[in-house]
Amino acid sequence: MSKSAPKAPDYAAAAQQQGQASKEITEQQTWANRPDQNTPWGSTTWQNKQEWDPTTNQYINKWTQDTTLNDQSQRALDAQMGLTTGRSELGASMMGRARDEFGNEMDWNKFQQGGNAVNPEDIQRDISTDGLTELDPSQKYYQNANDAIYNQWADRALPQQERDTDRLRTQLYNMGLKEGDSAYNTEMERMRQAQGDAQRQAQYQATIGSGAEAQRMLGMDAATRGQMFGERAQQGAFGNQAAGQQFGQNMASSQYQTQLRQQQIAEEMQKRGFSLNEINALISGQQVAMPNMPGFNTATKSDTTNYLGAAQMQGQSDLDRFNAQQAAAQGMLSGIGSVAGGFMMSDRKFKRDVRRIGSTPGGTPLYTFRYIFGGPEMVGVMADEVPHAVTKVAGISFVDYSKVN
């Protein structure tokens, strides 16, 4: 039977042991998720070395991922990179041309002037010219058409480009790549180049398309004017047939001048976008792709041994067992005390916190003590010091204090 309660478990040590186990399992999981992979196009391998971590003041594993192409893929990549470099440098050298073409505002005054409205004073009568003002083939047709064509593409394509970028980023993360990795940066840069090429091509198409649209709008203006003058001529707005003939000749001349101006504008717009189109043709092209490694089922982290919980359960179990032993001992001693006829139990092995405080009148040492199974502080003698007053019951010493001097 224990004389004192069991010692509490070392919870701090249990927590440290559990933390160490968690660290070891994390290392094992990381190792399991770093397989070397081989494909017909190349391989991906992993290396690690111990490096000092100043944040935790210990050595930890630092991992390095290497992607290696086979000989054919490497030669193709080297050739492609060399070609891309050459084309990019050539394209860069042509940027001065594109800058000159697009850097200056369109000089509309250098084009053939459009046909003027027929002057009614030259055709015998002063007629009303409401709605027959001079044509104004200005830049507004070109700019409005350019914005409309490009915005139509952008409304559909730009959101799709954002979704494609997010999808590629997620795919690279799932492959174990992250920002800063060479393979990650290469794939993202290729995506950005392709999207930039698409945007530049859309701008070029808008430039070409807007020229044609501007020409169409100017033609519609000329046709409308011709129809209006024709209707007036038929209605007798001009005094005689000669006036009508003169009107027709003037209209034909006006329309020719307008058409010539439209052709000059369209040619100038095509010229302005020619260098940009050549640059796009140079820098666009299919790059050699990095090998896509097959997916695999990654190892998941397993739970660590619950050392802390086990320590808590063990401590509670020890305490419960101690309490049960104490209760049993107290019950047994109580029963024995009844059998001993009221004698006081004075067996030294059942006492704790023993301290001598003096002696009886006959010189027998007196002590204060507590029984190991609980209760208040008591005063009495030790059975082994008054053998003449001791009675034993079930091997336990009881003292008859009437016999103690």
Image (cartoon, grey):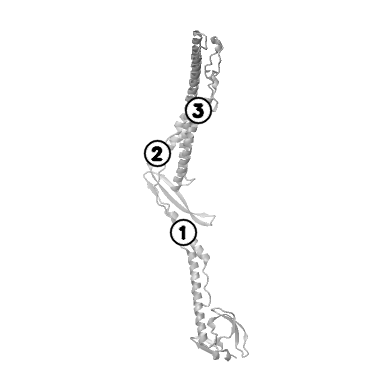
User: What's the distance in space between the residues labelled 3 and 2, CA to CA?
Assistant: 43 Å
Q: Say if mark 3 contacts mark 2, CB within 8 Å.
A: no
Foreground residue among 142 and 18: 142
153 vs 379, left or right, is left
Q: Disc 1 marks which amino acid?
A: Glu
Rendered-image quadrant of the C terminus = bottom right
Q: Which mark is residue 145?
A: 3
Closer to the chain start, of discs 1 and 3, is 1
Q: Position of residue 265 (x, y in %)?
A: 50, 22
Q: Position of residue 253 (x, y in %)?
A: 50, 14
Q: Residues within 10 Å of mark 2 (few under 14, many from 20)?
A: some
- On screen, residue 308 above or below 277: below
Most extreme residue toward the left, as rendered? 40
Q: Which residue is at 39% across, 41% downward?
A: 73
Mark nearest the camera among 2 and 1 is: 1
Q: Which residue is at 47% across, 63% downward?
A: 306
Foreground residue among 163 and 66: 163
Res. 187 image quadrant: top left
According to the image, label 1 marks what residue?
A: 24
Q: Disc 2 marks which amino acid?
A: Ala
User: What's the distance in space between the residues labelled 1 and 3, CA to CA?
Assistant: 66 Å
Q: Disc 3 marks which amino acid?
A: Ala
Closer to the chain start, of discs 3 and 2, is 2
Q: Which mark is residue 155?
A: none
SS category of the residue bearing label 1:
helix
Q: Position of residue 246 (x, y in %)?
A: 50, 10
According to the image, label 2 marks what residue?
A: 76
SS category of the residue bearing label 2:
helix
